[in-house]
């Protein structure tokens, strides 16, 4: 008789873990407290397939992003999910001009499809609307429809026999049973993939050291698509994220954002950011665009992990009896998901 695995959280990471558990012969249930898929972090992001260039050298986050990049493209093709392997520009902002060679040396050392550094003239030929600047070209970056990815993955898993149960909130744990709003659910192994709410699930199992603080990211939208590739700046030091950048969308618009600031409520998705910083980014990166039409878009919350009050900017796996908790799975979690699932299996 097969063992039962119950996954809490039907985001993209939870779904990929469901897949590897099903392949291992488990009876798999995925629970989510929301009535719809992709309501939180997996559906509220930039929709970028990251290359793995912005993370600490040789870190776990860097490794799973690089592996996840390759695996994500394989899954998107398998599932026929809308996407584009377009590449990405990384450009210096004012004051960063002297840092591009150092960052390019870091990127060159990574096991990714060959990056290039291009002169301002070369960049202008390929991206005529971008400001006159030298830039690093990262070929393995892409864009995708994140919500479509989550929903299509869920549909695929259901054809494989995985049970996905929505409107099912975990309220407690008792003797290998989850106490939920839809009744008691027994398990042999439980996996906490609850994202923004993963600390609350962990506390129900007696794991009290961790706290998730929601970090807001607001987006605006330019209702045209003057770019062929996302545009990022060189990394800032001591930043919560990658900063405001421009990302062309699959429906021929351009996302501007996100910014990053901590808020109190994990479920607060009201837009609080002034237009000025976003319009400044458009004016800086796209000086040829006069009077850009910029509109409100959407908002996301990153699950920033803290342990005993100290920031822990790592993807964290915590094994506890027949529980495995995944904590602090923020960007690049969307890209890293299939690689995180492969790592998860080694912990069983």
Image (cartoon, rainbow, N blue to C red):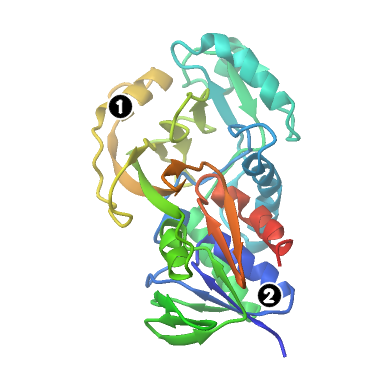
Question: Are dots 2 and 1 in contact, CB under 8 Å?
Answer: no
Q: Secondary structure at mark 2?
A: helix
Q: Residues within 10 Å of mark 1 (few under 14, many from 20)?
A: some
Q: Which corner quadrant holds the C terminus?
A: bottom right
* The N terminus lies in quadrant: bottom right
Residue drawn at (27%, 24%), measured in percent from left and top?
Answer: 291
On screen, residue 325 above or below 277: below
Q: Quadrant of residue 281?
A: top left
Q: Is residue 54 visible?
A: yes
Give residue 277's mark. 1
Q: Nearer the viewer, mark 2 or mark 1?
A: 2
Q: Quadrant of residue 39?
A: bottom left
Mark 2 surroundings within 10 Å by alpha-carbon count, few (fewer than 14), some (14 through 19), many (20 or more): some
First along the sequence among labels 2 and 1: 2
* Nearest the eye: 346 or 295: 346
As drawn, the residue found furthest toward the bottom would be 1
Q: Which mark is residue 99?
A: none
- 329 or 220: nearer the viewer: 329
Q: Position of residue 157 (x, y in %)?
A: 61, 73
Determine which quarter of the picture holds residue 80: bottom right
The residue shown at (52%, 10%) is 97
Residue depicted at x 43% and y 12%: 94
x, y (%) of residue 199? 44, 59
User: Could you tell whether 130 is left or right of 297 in the image?
Assistant: right
Residue marked by disc 2: 22
Instruction: Report how far apart the C-alphas of labels 2 and 1 lie in the structure.
Output: 46 Å
């Amino acid at each position: 008789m097969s063992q039962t695995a119950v996954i809490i959280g039907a985001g993209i990471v939870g779904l990929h873990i469901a897949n590897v558990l099903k392949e291992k012969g488990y009876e798999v249930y995925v629970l989510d407290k929301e009535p719809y898929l992709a309501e939180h972090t997996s559906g509220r992001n930039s929709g970028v397939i990251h290359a793995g260039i912005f993370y600490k050298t040789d870190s776990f986050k860097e490794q799973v992003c690089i592996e996840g990049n390759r695996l994500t493209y394989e899954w998107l093709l398998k599932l026929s999910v809308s996407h584009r392997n377009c590449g990405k520009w990384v450009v210096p902002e004012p004051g960063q001009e002297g840092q591009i060679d150092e960052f390019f040396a870091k990127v060159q050392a990574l096991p990714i499809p060959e990056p290039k550094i291009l002169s301002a003239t070369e960049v202008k030929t390929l991206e005529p609307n971008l400001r006159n600047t030298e830039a690093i070209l990262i070929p393995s970056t892409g864009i995708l429809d994140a919500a479509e990815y989550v929903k299509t993955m869920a549909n695929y898993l259901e054809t494989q026999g995985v049970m996905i149960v929505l409107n099912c909130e975990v309220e407690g744990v008792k003797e290998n049973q989850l106490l939920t709003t839809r009744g008691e659910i027994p398990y042999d192994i439980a996996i906490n993939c609850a994202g923004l709410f993963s600390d609350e699930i962990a506390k129900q199992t007696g794991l009290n050291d961790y706290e998730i603080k929601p970090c807001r990211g607001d987006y605006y939208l330019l209702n045209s698509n003057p770019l062929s590739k996302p545009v990022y700046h060189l990394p800032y030091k001591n930043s919560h994220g990658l900063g405001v950048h421009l990302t062309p969308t699959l429906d021929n618009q351009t996302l501007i954002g996100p910014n990053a600031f901590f808020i109190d409520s994990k479920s607060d998705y009201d837009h609080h950011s002034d237009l000025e910083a976003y319009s400044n980014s458009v004016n800086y990166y796209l000086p040829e665009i006069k009077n850009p039409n910029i509109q409100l878009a959407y908002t996301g919350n990153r699950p920033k992990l803290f342990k005993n009050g100290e920031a822990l900017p790592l993807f964290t796996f915590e094994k506890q009896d027949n529980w495995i908790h995944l904590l602090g799975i923020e960007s690049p979690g969307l890209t890293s998901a299939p690689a995180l699932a492969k790592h998860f299996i080694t912990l069983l």
